[in-house]
Image (cartoon, grey):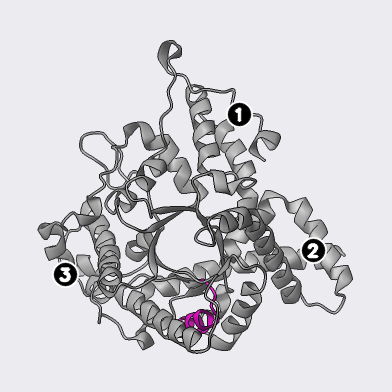
Amino acid sequence: MLRRKCPFAYSNSMTATGGRGVTVMTKHILELIAATNPDCEIWWDSSPLVYGNWVCKTLAAAPAQKRDLWAQQLQDFFDPDAPQKTLVRGVTTNPPLCQQAIEDDPQRWSNYIRGLIEEYPDGSVEDIYWMTYQEIVRLGAEKLRPLWQQSHRRYGYLSAQVDPRFAYDYAAMLRQARELQAIAPNVMVKCPGTFEGYRVLEEMTAMGVATNNTSSFSVAQYIACMDAVSRGLQRARDNGIDLFRWRSVITHMSDRLSQLGDLHRQAQARGIELSEEDIRWGEIAIFKRGYQLAGERRHPSKMLMCSMRAGSPKMRDGSIASWHIEKIAGADVVYTCPPSYIGQLLQAQDKMRPPRADAIDEALPRASMDKLMKIPYFLQSYQPDGMSPEQFNRHAPLVATIAEFSAATRTMVDFVARQFEAN
């Protein structure tokens, strides 16, 4: 795919060269992270349909002396036409990310939607939107099917999210979850960390369907997810359900936790000065606690890190850090990486330190934790009993994230509406 569409794409005849023609075969930082634990997984956080064009744009803007190396790394990272041969082990999507697929090829999707309008003359804008979303999910899952089959259903899942506008509507989410799981056996249903969302996660688990708990930011939510999954698995076994397509991941939305909630405001009100390092340690501490609890319980769900940032915190020695991946290196976890983040890592990799395989076991710094433990917002997210399930729906980063994703979903719906108008 990449070689056909992109004039800059890597081919077997290309090599990356350094000064005086010296061959340089530098591994991407995500390859190094994956190598710290054989069970670590790197996922692509967007539709597989956009990868080829994104690579071409990225390489077109790359420094000339780095273009061959980047092309090689991106080919090794993911090839939607041969995913079983590359680094990526799964894909996360949602309606806003599927909107990126439409923006990547608007004429194709205009024609597709207008065809649906003709085929279903009684269909509403919302009906046609949902059909279109399901088609993008289907095509993406189809791309990953070879990896799913080759790995004996361990990898190769495409995570498809229920409509975020229904995050508090159990019946609507359950109906959509059932429709999404029927698209392909390697579709993983993605549900929000709302009170209602965990009920849907239990139901999907009881059906033997793979699930992803998204819009989750707190240890209390991670425990709620583990409990829902455990109940669902027990029901599945009691009912003789085949679990051949089941697995579970629990998403930690790292940067969103600190940026969309009350951390900064509450710290300022208490005269607590938080450095960038303190903030990052807080995000990592919550992830680590969830990871530790899952290990203590021997729970089959796997923690997933998302919402990462490169260049954060800023390092005094001039190196570039991305603590969201570096400080949990060595763990049996998933990292899901959007195009923008991978681009940041490409730009920064010359100044990044190799990850340490024991980073996940590094102790949290006492000075940072002493500050954070005085802030109610952090305690609410860090303590296992920091929130009751009934409080999840009022958690500030969850409310803000669902509002943002809902607005992006409406953009996709409006694209469909414009095709109605054109007809």
- Give the number of the disc on residue 58: none
Badge 1 crowding class, 10 Å Cα cut-off, few under 14, some 14 to 19, many 20 or more, is few
Give the magenta part as a residue range: 196-210
Is residue 202 on the magenta stretch? Answer: yes
Residue type at the position of mark 2: Ile
Instruction: Check disc 3 and report its element: helix, strand or loop.
Output: loop
Query: Is residue 55 in view from this perspective?
Result: yes
Is residue 278 on the magenta stretch? Answer: no
Q: Dot 1 corresponds to which residue?
A: 11
Residue at x-position 41% and y-position 14%: 19
Among numbered discs 1 and 2, the one appearing first in the sequence: 1
Q: Nearer the viewer, mark 1 or mark 2?
A: 1
Q: From the image, give the main secondary structure of the stretch colored magenta.
A: helix
Q: Is residue 155 above or below residue 57?
A: below
| Structural distance between the alpha carbons of marks 3 and 2 | 51 Å
Q: Residue 253: where, in percent of width, then height?
A: 39, 63
Q: Residue 411: where, in percent of width, then height?
A: 64, 64
Residue at x-position 67% and y-position 58%: 142
Asked if the residue under mark 2 is in contact with the one under mark 1, i.e. CB atoms within 8 Å, the reply is no
Residue type at the position of mark 1: Ser
Is residue 216 toward the left or the right of residue 409 in the image?
Answer: left
Residue at x-position 55% and y-position 43%: 85
Q: Dot 2 corresponds to which residue?
A: 113
Among numbered discs 3 and 2, the one appearing first in the sequence: 2
